[in-house]
Amino acid sequence: MFSRVESFLFQYPVVLAMGLVRDIMVRDVITIEHDKTAKDVALLFAEKGISSLVVVKDNKPIGLVTERDLARKVSTTDRKSIEVPLSEIMSPNFRWVEPMTPIEDAVQKMLNKNVRRLLVLDNNNLAGIITETDLAKYLRSKLLIDGALDDVTALNRKVIKSS
């Protein structure tokens, strides 16, 4: 079953031909230290209104934790969230791209790996993150701009033919 983003991308592949990950990535990534607990994660999610956190150790990304991870892994235990170490709920196998990666390559990676977000690393340092939402916003704006340009071009043709 295709996600909405996948079906959208297959309909408009030309839109992706322009742009680099650095153009759409979120640079102010909220992180959490590796030695925290599930409760710390839940509090940060609520406080910041976000659905994922990059887990860091010595300022280097070592994992990713999402609301889904929190819900699935903490709710299946009888322990309190303050007793569940972050290391038990985070995913150490995060996917990443570089800032100069073409957006179309990042999209393909997300589709191939079935992930909703990619970390952006520059020389192994966290530079940003891109999510399906960031991608959808970018594609929407590209389509609106391209559509407006098509309208102007069509109007110019009409004016020229009328002259």
Image (spheres, rainbow, N blue to C red):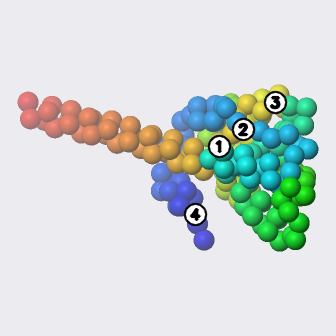
Q: Residues within 10 Å of mark 4 (few under 14, many from 20)?
A: few
Which corner quadrant of the image does residue 69 belong to?
A: bottom right
> Element type at marker 1?
helix
Residue at left offset 82%, top offset 65%: 73
Which mark is nearer the camera, 1 or 2? 1
Q: Residues within 10 Å of mark 2 (few under 14, many from 20)?
A: some
Q: Residue 155 in the image: state x and y as whole percent.
A: 20, 37
Residue at left offset 14%, top offset 33%: 159
Q: 89 or 45, which lies in front?
A: 45
Q: Which residue is mark 1?
A: 48
Q: 53 or 2, which lies in front?
A: 53
Question: Marks 2 and 1: in contact by CB < 8 Å?
Answer: yes
The numbered mark at residue 125 is: 3
Q: Residues within 10 Å of mark 3 (few under 14, many from 20)?
A: few
Q: Which residue is mark 4?
A: 3
Which mark is nearer the camera, 4 or 2? 2
If you read the primary sequence from the N terminus, does the residue marked by circle 4 or circle 2 appear first? 4
Work out which residue is located at the far left of the displayed protein and give it.
163
Q: Residue 84 in the image: state x and y as whole percent.
A: 89, 58
Question: Marks 4 and 1: in contact by CB < 8 Å?
Answer: no
Q: Residue 90 in the image: state x and y as whole percent.
A: 84, 53
Which mark is nearer the camera, 3 or 4? 3
If you read the primary sequence from the N terminus, does the residue marked by circle 3 or circle 4 appear first? 4
Type of amino acid at the residue the image marks with label 3: Asn
Q: Which residue is mark 2?
A: 30
Which mark is nearer the camera, 3 or 1? 1
Q: Quadrant of the C terminus?
A: top left
> Element type at marker 3?
strand
Kindly tell me whether residue 154 is visible in this rendering.
Answer: yes
Type of amino acid at the residue the image marks with label 1: Lys
